[in-house]
Amino acid sequence: MKKILLLLLLIFSIILYGCGSENRQFDAFTDSVFEEALMGNTLNLHFLIADTSDIAPYKVSLGDFSEKSFKNASISLKSQIKELNSFKYQNLSNDRQFTYQILSAHYKDELKYNDNFYMNEYLSFSSGWQNTLPAYLLEFKFRNKRDINDYMKILKISGNFFDSLLDFEEEKSKLGLFMNEFQADNTVLQCNSFIKDTENHYLISSFDDKINSAKFLSDNEKQAYIRLNKKYLDKYFFPSYKKISDTVTRLKHTSNNYGGLCNYPGGRDFYEGLVRNNTGSDKSVDEIEDLLEDALADDFLKISRILKSEKDISGLFASYDKGYVHRTDILPNLYIDMQKIFPEPVIHSDSYRLETVPEIMENYEAPAYYMIPPIDSIGDNVIYINNKYYPDEDMSRLIPVMAHEGFPGHMYQTTYFRSMNPPNIRLLLSFPGYTEGYATYVETLSYYIAGFDKQAADYLAANTTFSLELYSLFDIYANYDGKSFKDILKIGIGFGMDTDSVLSIYQYVIDNPCNYLRYSVGYLEIQELKSEYKKYHRKDFSLMNFHEFLLKKGPAQFEIIRQTMQDQ
């Protein structure tokens, strides 16, 4: 009997050792993927890691847009898939199995559409690199001299980076995949506006402010860096915008497409991949279209009933908690009021900066956005508000946008998930369907949290989701179904929109396909998750418990989150 017991113990210890070894190897694999991504792009490194002083010397790089780079990325992806598949799933811990599922699904999606890289548009007037890179430079932190030197090197290589992007656009043109003329016109206008006054540019003034506040620099060093920044902007950075303007102007007539993605060769298949990657939903585009049309009809009926019962709905908008007076009051109040239905935040109520979008970029930047903090500096949060969209203190508009970006939205969700100490690879992967769907979900709750009259809150919440659902349908109609502007205009007018508004949305969804779907489909998927969670927790369901479940799972594909709910 003793021999049998000893044998069983030996077998059990071997199993435990084997599982432990498998977990360690899996962690090493995910860490290596994370490190490779950091070292391949200096912006990733600086915005994910605050203190880079202990990192070995590295080459400052922004990557490039050559066909060779895309093919190398494909080879690397296949290698990672092979290594992932080598792990014995059943030997991994529960948390690692969850990460495995996420990675497996992510790799599968990437591989399916990896060869269609020329379908991507990196000079989109709403989200192209001519927009994105200045935003990164504006928020680039100078914690030590290495940071400043990296910033300078980025400016120095920015010319080559944009040249590579323009070569990519030349290839797109040859393949008949160049952007629409209206996209080209807007991108040209944007670039010309950006370099209209280079002597008084915000990339000069913001840099000077950061350098002058750097206590680790001498006065002579500060002046030297200020001169070098101006020199590199004039020599490398600003001339690139003139090149973009000239090249896009020259190529704009090579496009024969006046509609959405489906009008390009392979565009419909590519759009299916975009929908999957942007929503995190495993539903087909046709299923999503049906889902959106049903939700739109429900919201339209809800809004109609409220308008019929309330003669002065606008009068109810002033019914919110009177503690919300100015935009600076909103987040401290939401921080407290949200805790009735959300777990306590892991950061203090003042762990953020509230900034405004530079005036020169107001026409091209989002209405608001949140800058994710580095992994090792969780309190370093920044929220940008675009005064073009929010020029006054209208609380019925400011409260939801602050909730979306701050508490209990992006800032809260990001920092809460970070506090769970997830593997670094989870912080690198992007699941906008989850993050924007969650932020939209809490945006609709913000009216109730802030104490709006229930009728007003019902109206405002339904109006928010109605607009997103309608614009998302415009997106699918244009990019997947092939409907013309004339077709979509009829639909928009039927819902009370004017021609200019429909045209603006139509051009936006062609320039930035699937962006609205992140919000609408993500929101509807979370509502479905909530309904299913209620079924599994009939006796002890509460919003607090559901929110805690959703926050702890963190960004992922919805079908994988749904599966873990069923497995509990």
Image (cartoon, rainbow, N blue to C red):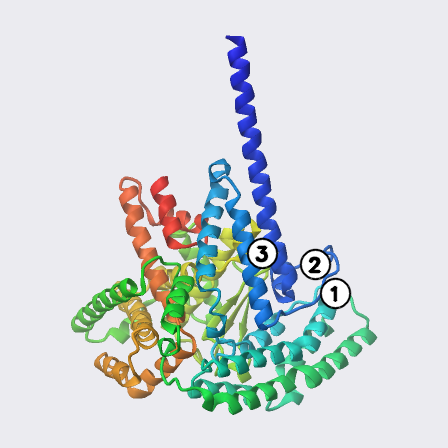
Q: Is residue 529 left or right of residue 408?
A: left
Identify which residue, 257 or 92, lies in the foreground.
257
**Position of 163 compared to 156: left or right?**
left
Question: Dot 3, how many residues are within 10 Å of its Cα: few (below 14), some (14-19), or many (20+)?
Answer: many
Q: Amino acid at mark 1?
A: Arg
Determine whether 364 is above or below 197 in the image. Answer: above
Q: Of the numbered discs in the image, which one, if any, rests on residue 134?
A: none
Between marks 3 and 1 in the image, the one whose residue lies nearer the viewer: 1
Type of amino acid at the residue the image marks with label 2:
Thr
Q: Name the element at disc 3.
A: loop
Residue 547 visible in rendering: no
The quarter holding residue 130 reads: bottom right
- Badge 1 is on which residue? 146
Taking 30 as reference, is 473 left or right? left
Alpha carbon distance from label 3 to label 1: 21 Å
Residue at 63%, 65% in the rendered image: 41
Task: Report the number of discs.
Answer: 3
Disc number at residue 52?
2
x, y percentage for residue 407? 45, 60
Q: Position of residue 272 (x, y in %)?
A: 37, 66
Q: Are marks 2 and 1 in contact (CB under 8 Å)?
A: yes
Please state, as top left, top right, bottom left or bottom right, where the C terminus lies in the image: top left
* Mark 3 to mark 2 CA distance (whole Å): 15 Å
Pointer 3: what residue? 378
